[in-house]
Image (cartoon, rainbow, N blue to C red):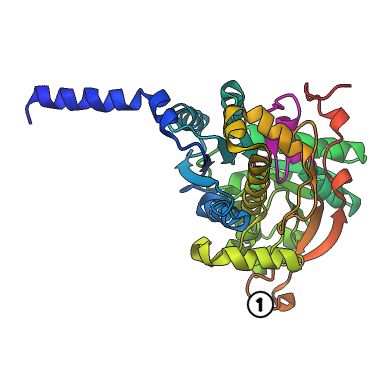
């Protein structure tokens, strides 16, 4: 190929990429496009990754989209836990590929950045996995629903339980980005309100930290009763493993895994994770409906993993979004993400993963939260029987009161 031919080919390729309007017009009138944006290859892969995609596809099947005359296309991308990558993908999906809904988006810094893009472009956004409670606070948007959990709920449930059990002196090991900061902030507020103290904190680089030994030594030196792990996924797993190697829990120090998923427990094993307390809004073995959902999606889950709450949130959010699309019509849903989110808020939610619920004006999805304890090996009845229920917090009590969030969408 001559240099002229190569330049012509490159120019033609660039021109194709610069024609989003033509591609958007070519989209079938009855087609909805959903973009699943998450970590497909890094430390949150098992928490989100292909499992979230499997749950989205299960929701489409359970909804019966084809039978209702709605064609649903699913796009998948890896944001690598980087806000710049996430923003670029979101813009390309909307401008070039005419994506109507962006879904999942773990890593709070990415979640907040994508939140701005979706609002600017007037598309719909269901965040299942970014934890920062700012998504329904100062950063709330008419285009966004925060679905599964948030830092306020985790802090109130897990942090509050630890303080009530006597853990009134804390040291935080915190992932140094928006999620870790928000989780530490919200948990510290509950600790101080209950009369406890925060003796110190250390910020760990994210991503890229695998050795937590120096941070654990600092925590131990503080003489804190509780080490609060304001991190997630692989960081939580490594922190707990290394704390066990140091024998911290044998010396009476408690670990507070402020965000821990069932895939983390599986990776740790019950011998290491036993006794840890965490909060979930979904557990596969909670009731008949959660077990039925799990059995349907299990054949599509990667490596035999049971779905965790973030992945189940993708199922639940997709199902409710499609109900709203069917209710208002595909054309209207595609024309305005804000109107679609408004229709979702006006409709009660109900599905096998979370049961009945609702969506508040600030975009907060409401459902119960469950305080769980990891079973000892001798208590487990079989594979993935990992949790026992300690406490249920009702939907109207689990999350931050709407008047306290500072969301500009909510009238005082």
Depth check: give the residue in front, 334 or 3: 334
- Front-lying residue, 58 or 397: 58
- Asked whether 14 or 28 is in front, the reply is 28
The secondary structure that dominates the magenta segment is loop
Do we see residue 222 in this rendering? no
For image coordinates 52% across by 46% down, the residue present is 72
Magenta span: 127-152
Determine which quarter of the picture holds residue 105.
top right
Q: Position of residue 190 (x, y in %)?
A: 86, 39
Residue 245 pos. (x, y %): 61, 60
**Residue 296's spot in the image, x, y percent?**
60, 66
User: SS at mark 1?
Assistant: loop
> Toward the viewer: 68 or 295?
68
Residue 18 is covered by the magenta coloring: no
Image point (71%, 46%), residue name = 148
Q: Disc 1 designates what residue?
A: 382
């Amino acid at each position: 190929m001559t240099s002229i031919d190569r330049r012509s080919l490159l120019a033609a390729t660039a021109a194709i990429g610069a024609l989003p309007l033509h591609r958007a017009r070519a989209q079938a009138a009855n087609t909805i496009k959903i973009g699943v944006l998450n970590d497909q290859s890094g430390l949150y892969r098992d928490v989100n990754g292909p499992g979230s995609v499997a749950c989205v596809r299960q929701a489409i099947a359970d909804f019966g989209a084809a039978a209702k005359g709605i064609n649903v296309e699913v796009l998948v991308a890896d944001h690598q836990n980087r806000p710049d990558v996430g923003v670029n993908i979101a813009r390309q999906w909307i401008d070039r590929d005419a994506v109507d809904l962006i879904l999942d988006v773990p890593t709070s810094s990415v979640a907040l950045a994508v939140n701005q893009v979706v609002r600017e472009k007037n598309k719909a956004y269901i965040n299942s996995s970014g934890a920062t409670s700012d998504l329904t606070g100062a950063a709330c948007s008419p285009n966004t629903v925060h679905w599964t959990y948030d830092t306020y709920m985790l802090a109130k449930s897990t942090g509050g339980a630890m303080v009530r059990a006597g853990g009134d002196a804390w040291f935080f090991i915190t992932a140094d980005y928006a999620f870790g900061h928000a989780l530490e902030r919200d948990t510290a507020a509950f600790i101080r309100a209950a009369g406890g103290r925060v003796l110190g904190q250390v910020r760990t680089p994210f991503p890229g930290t695998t050795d937590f030994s120096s941070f654990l030594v600092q925590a131990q030196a503080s003489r804190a009763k509780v080490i609060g792990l304001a991190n997630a996924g692989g960081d939580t797993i490594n922190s707990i493993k290394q704390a066990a190697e140091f024998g911290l829990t044998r010396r009476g120090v408690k670990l507070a895994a402020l965000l821990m998923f069932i895939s983390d427990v599986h990776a740790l094993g019950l011998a290491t994770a036993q006794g840890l307390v965490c909060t979930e809004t979904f557990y596969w073995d909670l009731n008949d409906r959660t077990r039925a959902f799990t059995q349907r999606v299990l054949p599509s889950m990667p490596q035999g993993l049971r779905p965790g709450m973030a992945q189940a949130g993708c199922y639940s959010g997709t199902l409710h979004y499609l109900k709203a699309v069917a209710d208002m019509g595909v054309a209207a849903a595609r024309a305005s993400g804000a109107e679609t989110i408004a229709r979702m808020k006006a409709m009660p939610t109900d599905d096998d993963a979370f049961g009945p619920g609702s969506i508040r004006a600030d975009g907060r999805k409401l459902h119960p939260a469950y305080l769980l304890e990891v079973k000892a090996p001798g208590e487990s009845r079989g594979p993935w029987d990992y949790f026992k229920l300690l406490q249920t917090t009702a939907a109207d009590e689990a999350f931050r009161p709407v008047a306290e969030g500072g969301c500009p969408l909510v009238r005082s």
